[in-house]
Image (cartoon, rainbow, N blue to C red):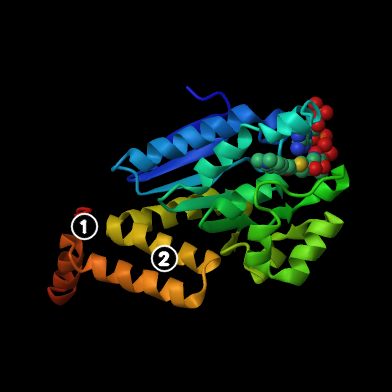
Amino acid sequence: MPRYLVVQAPEDGVRLITLQRPEALNALNTELLAELAAELDSADRDPAIAAVVITGNRKAFAAGADIREMAERDLVGILNDPRVAHWQRIAAFSKPLIAAVNGFALGGGCELVMCADIVIAGEDARFGQPEINLGIIPGAGGTQRLLRAVGKPLAMQMVLTGEPISARHAQQAGLVSEVSQPELTVERAMQIGAAIARKAPLAVRLAKEALLKAADTDLATGLRFERHAFTLLAGTADRAEGIRAFQEKRPAHFQGQ
Ligand code: DAK
């Protein structure tokens, strides 16, 4: 049983993970990250799970790495930091990860948002990389993913000043896909997860992989990957079913084959 997460499966095919460390605004200590990585690994292996929604509470999605824990680490402790492997496992999750964000998403919290594929933010959400105020820089992708998401000027402004941006600003900048009323973020994220769960699983997996390629490769390589992935899907029963269902004017029933 995880100590810092609540894991539920309220919708067919969608697992809901709630960060549960409210006394520290869901600060991401090593144990919480290990639990999250293990939950995502388990969701990845479970064929009944199509997508995962991750959320926090109304005050905080997550206020960053646990600063108390960080204070205890010296240089060697940071060189041997077990969190690096947890972050890699979280970023490697192969199914759609949807973040439902209210309140603070700061530092590692904002970096966790950037590991998600779809981001629904409540109007009151705040996104920021305040590490500069601690005399450090982001350590879980905040310089790399943020620049790719929002472009150089805003990434520089956020990382160099540490000042957070609003949900609306984050949406305009490309960090957030949709803004909703705070009380509806989880519901909306679950709806999106459920919609994805009705699609062909192999197409969903390859679509995510192809889209992520766009962020870390040149156009020619990305287009080649897309072409190969597109071609691979021609061999699936779900493609045949999708096309047949369209022609027969009925909903498709995908089997993941
Ligand atoms: N860590 C630990 N405790 C935290 C925390 C954090 N990040 N954020 C808040 N808390 C705790 C507070 O200490 C307080 O606890 P008590 O004093 O009540 O025991 C409680 O949560 C409530 O917080 P506040 O009283 O401060 O609440 P306010 O509403 O007044 O302020 C705030 C909310 C979010 C503005 C403020 O709490 C704040 O500034 N928090 C720190 C935000 C921050 O600086 N985040 C960045 C942390 S550095 C890496 C991976 C990741 C990272 C680095 C390396 N590797 C894999 C190598 C990431 C680094 C970071 O994220």
Q: Indicate which label's residue lies in the foreground, 1 or 2.
A: 2
Position of residue 25 measured from the top left corner of the image (x, y, whole percent): 71, 36
Q: Can residue 59 be seen at all in this image of the molecule?
A: no
| Quadrant showing the C terminus | bottom left
Dots 1, 2 in contact, CB < 8 A: no
Q: Quadrant of ligand 1?
A: top right
In the structure shown, which secondary structural element does the residue marked by tag 1 occupy?
A: loop
Label 2 sits on residue? 210
Looking at the image, can residue 68 be seen? Answer: yes
What residue lies at 12% left-to-right and 73% top-to-bottom?
A: 248
Q: Residue at x 52, y 35 (%)?
A: 36
Tell me which amino acid carries mark 2: Ala
Q: What residue is at 63 percent from the left and 66 percent from the top?
A: 148
Q: Nearer the viewer, residue 203 or 70?
A: 70
| Place of residue 154 in the rendered image (x, y in percent of width and height, measured from the top left) | 76, 67
Left or right of residue 87, residue 135 in this image: right
Mark drawn on residue 7: none
Residue 254's tag is 1
Q: Earlier in the sequence, mark 1 or mark 2?
A: 2
Give the alpha-carbon distance from disc 1 to disc 2, as whole Å: 21 Å
Spot occupied by residue 243 in the image (x, y as percentages of width and height) = 18, 72
Mark 2 surroundings within 10 Å by alpha-carbon count, few (fewer than 14), some (14 through 19), many (20 or more):
many
Establish whether ligand 1 lies closer than 8 Å to the Cβ of label 2: no
- Residue at 20%, 69% in the rendered image: 234
Q: Is residue 257 left or right of residue 180?
A: left
